[in-house]
Image: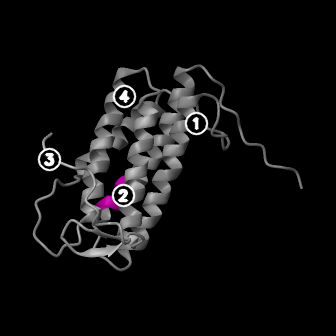
Amino acid sequence: MGDFKIYTKTGDKGMTSLVGGSRVPKYHERIEAYGTIDELNAFVGVLADEIIQDDIKKDLIVIQGNLFVLGSLVADDGLKKVKLPELKDADVTFLEEHIDNMQSLLPELKSFILPVGHKAVSKCHVCRVVCRRAERLLIKLAENHDINPLYIKYLNRLSDYFFVLSRRLAQLFDVEEIPWIAPKS
């Protein structure tokens, strides 16, 4: 590794650099958005470590790669021409196809279900809610910055994917889905 150091000390005063080079406070809305995408990526890793099915594990690795791409795209301030990988419509299609495939194996959903039953199921729901937060932050960012609508669409579909995956995992791990029962007034 030579002289490479992981710490740069450039953020010690609460500022950080975006991909295009501008310096912003670490609480900047762009940092919040891609930081939450990074958080989601870490939770997807935690979920993947719980999965024993190779096909699902491979899908989660694809998703993690796409989240790295998305994070870098959101981190780009657009001030310099920087060559970054792109998120594509095919990445959304990938999620939709996997949602449809899993859903075809599941019983009809007749009520809300509680996010519980197995560690993998619960972790899937954590991924879903962090994904929804990332989506909300990206929508907010898009109010003041040029954000490709595909990025929001991807996160929207990804949260749906995690919901359906949670149900599929409950089925694979043979755990009962517990319906939410509304309190009587």
The quadrant of the image that shows the N terminus is: top left
From this view, report whether residue 67 is shown above or below residue 16: above
Mark 4 element type? helix
What distance separates the C-alpha of mark 4 from that of mark 1? Answer: 16 Å
- Which residue lies at the image location 28% right of the left edge and 54% below the top edge? 7
What distance separates the C-alpha of mark 4 from that of mark 3? Answer: 35 Å
Q: Where is residue 21 in the image (x, y as percent from the top left)?
A: 19, 71
Mark 1 element type? helix
Q: Position of residue 105 (x, y in %)?
A: 48, 26
Q: Mark 4 or mark 3: which comes first in sequence?
A: 3
- Main secondary-structure element of the magenta-colored stretch: helix
The extreme bottom residue here reads 144
The residue that label 4 is drawn on is 57
User: Start and end of the magenta stretch?
Assistant: 150-154
Instruction: Please tell me how crowded label 2 is: few (under 14), some (14-19), or many (20+) other residues with Cα within 10 Å.
Output: few
Residue type of the residue flagged with mark 3: Asp
The residue that label 2 is drawn on is 153
Mark 2 vs mark 3: give the one in front.
3
In the rendered structure, the answer to whether residue 185 lies left or right of residue 111 reads right
- What's the mark number on residue 122? 1
Q: Where is residue 130 in the image (x, y as percent from the top left)?
A: 49, 52
